[in-house]
Amino acid sequence: MRMNYWLFKTEPDAFGIDDLANMSDQTEHWDGIRNYQARNFLRDDVKVGDLVFIYHSSCKDVGIAGIAEVVKEGYVDHTQFDPECKYHDPKSDPQKPRWYMVDVKLMRKFDRILSLKSIKSMSEITQIGLVKKGNRLSIMPVEQVEFEYLLAQCDAL
DNA sequence: GCCAACGTTGGC
DNA sequence: GCCAACGTTGGC
């Protein structure tokens, strides 16, 4: 069986790689994903052992901040049923939950952010959603060759 | 804060 | 099922 590679976006002002580092066992559930395409990935395709780039968006230092490993796959995101939560979804039926999440564990925080600008400048990187028009998906697959190439660039920082 | 590019909603 | 209006994302 072949593992898969992903990129998860997060806004560091809300929850960034340092917050993940400060969690017990450096593990946290990746909740609050409210987009169907991203949900489908989380529910069906993100598997234990997959590797994930943690990407910081909507902030001063936009780019890839580190790597996490999936330690629990596809289960119901409980925040959708919590009326107090900003991720509450009153239209989601508890008998047939709409939203899913996974658990990730931090593996590495890079010394520096691999910036979106530099990623866009790499001629080797053409497939990842980050470099494509739109680029709004918060959970996106990364091809193995591009994951490994980007990782090598992070190591070189 | 601006605004382009999306995704979602809802009337028909 | 179409599509206009609306809401959100995210880089800058």
Image (spheres, coloured by chain):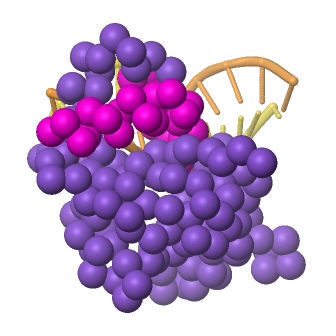
Chain colours: A purple, B yellow, C orange
- Disc count in the image? 0
Looking at the rendering, which quadrant does residue C2 occupy?
top right
Q: Residue A80: x percent and y percent? A: 61, 75
At a point 37% along the width and 88% down the height, the residue shown is A24
Is residue B3 positioned above or below B9 on the image? Answer: above
Q: Is residue A30 magenta?
A: no
At a point 63% along the width and 72% down the height, the residue shown is A72
> In this rendering, would A141 be left or right of A152?
right
Is residue A149 positioned above or below A55 on the image? Answer: above
At a point 76% along the width and 54% down the height, the residue shown is A44
> In this rendering, would A23 be left or right of B10?
left
Is residue A18 positioned above or below A95 on the image? Answer: above
Is residue A56 positioned above or below A145 on the image? Answer: below
Q: Is residue A141 magenta?
A: yes
Viewer-proximal residue among A107 and A117: A107
Viewer-proximal residue among A20 and A10: A20
Residue A34 visible in the current orientation: no
- Quadrant of the drawing holding the C terminus of chain A: top left
Give the magenta part as a residue range.
A128-157
Q: Residue A30: x percent and y percent? A: 50, 68
Residue A157 visible in the current orientation: yes
> In this rendering, would A74 be left or right of A105?
right
Q: Residue A140: x percent and y percent? A: 54, 41
> In this rendering, would A102 be left or right of A117?
right
At a point 31% along the width and 68% down the height, the residue shown is A15
Looking at the rendering, which quadrant does residue A151 occupy?
top left
